[in-house]
Image (cartoon, helix red, strand yellow):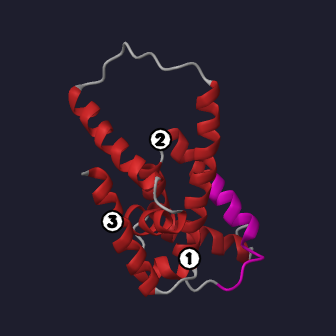
Amino acid sequence: MGDDPEYREFMAMVDDHGTALWAMLRRLCRHEQDAEDAFQETAVRVWRHLASRPRLRNPRGWLMTIGYRVFLNQKERVRVNEELADPPDLRIDPPPEEAARNEDAGRVHSALEQLAEPVREVLTLHYVGGLSLHETAASMGISVGTVKSRLHAGLNQVRRMLQ
């Protein structure tokens, strides 16, 4: 398998961009195991579509976009499972610092959830995924100007919601 060109390309992509993908998924997912699952699912999807995709000008953007979409799918499955699960034990109090951090993160997460999907995707790929403006634009198939306007609008909306 090591002499297969697709395998070499896949491994090079993981070597070059896997750390950035892992960092983005780790920030998006609430638990390390969820991030590991999302990373693995992303790798499987990339492997399946490697031969059928066109020549990549932005492999990092392609990989990060797939990772973000895997996260969204995973989040929906988790939401459905949480609706079916027993309620959490509210008698257990977390340390005050963690509680404050979780509250802030929850407020930001709630604000992001209220944004339109194209705006939320731009914010996530650029700020959480660490893609440049050009990489974000290329991965979404939009212009850099559109990325900038969505970032500006999204940040303003989030600021207003957090006030």
Distance from Cα at disc 3 to Cα at disc 2: 27 Å
Residue 92 visible in the shown view: yes
62 left or right, relative to 27: right
What numbered label is drawn on residue 1? none
101 within the magenta span? no
Closer to the chain start, of discs 3 and 2, is 2
49 left or right, relative to 8: right
* Discs 3, 1 touching: Cβ within 8 Å: no
Q: Residue at x 55, y 46 (%)?
A: 36
What numbered label is drawn on residue 32? 2
Label 2, residues with CA under 10 Å away: few <14, some 14-19, many ≥20: few
For disc 1, the marked residue is: 140
* Discs 3, 2 touching: Cβ within 8 Å: no
- In the image, residue 78 lies at what x, y percent? 60, 38
Q: Which is more toward the observer, 137 or 67?
A: 137
- In the image, residue 73 lies at what x, y percent? 64, 51
Q: Label 3's element?
A: helix
For disc 3, the marked residue is: 155
Q: Residue at x 72, y 72 (%)?
A: 50
Residue span colored magenta: 41-55
54 within the magenta span? yes
Q: Which kind of residue does numbered mark 3 sit on?
A: Leu
The answer to whether 106 is drawn above or below residue 138 in the figure is above
Distance from Cα at disc 1 to Cα at disc 2: 27 Å
Query: Which residue extends farthest top?
Result: 91
160 left or right, relative to 111: left
Q: Residue at x 78, y 76 (%)?
A: 52
Label 1, residues with CA under 10 Å away: few <14, some 14-19, many ≥20: some
The answer to whether 129 is drawn above or below residue 133 in the figure is above
Q: Which is more toward the observer, 103 or 22?
A: 103
